[in-house]
Amino acid sequence: MIKKIIIAIVCCMAGTIYAQNGTVSPYSYFGVGDLRSVVSVENQMMGGISMYGDSIHLNLNNPAAYAKLRTTTYTASISRKEIGLKSVDGKQNSSVTNLGYLSIGFPIIDEIAGVGFGLKPYSSVGYGIKSKYNDPDAGLISNEYSGEGGLNTVYFSLGFKLMKDLTLGATANLNFGTVKSRRVQNIENVQFGTFDFRESQISGGNFKFAANYEPMITDKIRMNTFLGIDTQVNMSSKNTKTIGSFSSSTGQEVEKIDVNLNRLGLKRRGIMVPTNTTLGLGFGQDRKWFVGGEYSFQKLEKYSAPFFNVDNLTYENASKFSLGGFYVPDYTSFSSYFKRVTYRAGAKYGNSGMIVNNESIKDFGITFGLGLPMNAPNDPFSNINIGFEIGQRGTTDANLIKESYIKINIGLSLNSKWFHKRTID
């Protein structure tokens, strides 16, 4: 029965991840949307650090960690995000629930080599913005902007132990999806309004390479050093644009024109997201505790997406600091369930690389949560991970919007024994 229920849930999730809108942020208006660096819930709770991996969980953002696997592991997540939007004109609340990722990994040789593959979001678009201003000549002008869609990633990862304490890994990513945007304008006392609809079908990919060096520096303490390189993402977009007019009183279309983007050189354009590099250093005691920090940097000033250019947006180099860790009181305890619980916490601070109205858009968050053993029969490894994130992004300066958010993540990590029939009672 458990097997049938889980397979049904997994099948539903696979379709929903592709179809969903993963954000309600006004900042997803820019480019191909919010670029989402997806890590497992376990790593999200530790400030989003990528370096740490073990033998029973999947690390979606560190292919070198697959070398540690000694069980087949299935993992998926769901999240709920409550967002408060604040501008100089007022406040508004919104929320979004979405599925995060769906992945499987298994060892080729236990704790020597492993592989994994799955589906996760790359970017999300979901916004609705209204603005009004008085033009000295035309009068009151109202604009409504809305967008939806985003890109998903299908990936395949391989990790292997090259020598003692040194593991290497690589991931191949294929990104695909559709982004839609809409602008509607009305002018006071003018009979007709205008609209501008755009749609882009996008595909492309890149590779990620990672290395972990984890020597013992005392009898109990292990050092973890990490290098991760997300290579330049190259994608192409097939674009359409429709403009026209409509009756302001009835909303009925009056005129509709398909813009010849070939003449403008915009029918098919490339999208380039620069290389992102991450360096990490951490220390810990195996199956007991770990603490580590990471620094990521990206020359986002070279970001290119000509069809998505807007006047009030430029890019600068992006960066992010992450700090996090975990603690397990006693993973072998039979007398106390809570001694086998994994307690995780972390923090992150980053510059997104976007400059809107001459203001840099920054993000700060605090994370924490629990890894709860499921106590399944003959399976000590499967667990439910519950994580929380509290943070802010953006600013109210320069007529922009500041986001304050609370995010709840739930991740399911299942050991392969859930799918094996018992041969001995």
Image (cartoon, rainbow, N blue to C red):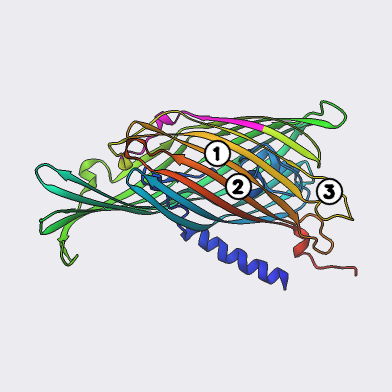
Q: Residue at x 36, y 44 (%)?
A: 87
Tell me if I can see residue 256 in this picture: no
Mark drawn on residue 102: none
**What amino acid type is highlighted by mark number 3?**
Tyr
Which span is picked out in magenta?
293-306
Q: Amino acid at mark 2?
A: Phe
- Compared with 226, 401 (above or below) is below
Q: Looking at this view, is 262 or 99 the one in front? A: 99
Q: Secondary structure at mark 2?
A: strand
**Mark 1 closeness class: few <14, some 14–19, many ≥20 residues within 10 Å:** some
Quadrant assignment, res 324: top right
Q: Residues within 10 Å of mark 2 (few under 14, many from 20)?
A: many
Identify the mark at residue 207; answer none if there is no mark: 1
Pointer 2: what residue? 156
Q: Quadrant of the N terminus?
A: bottom right
Between marks 3 and 2 in the image, the one whose residue lies nearer the viewer: 3
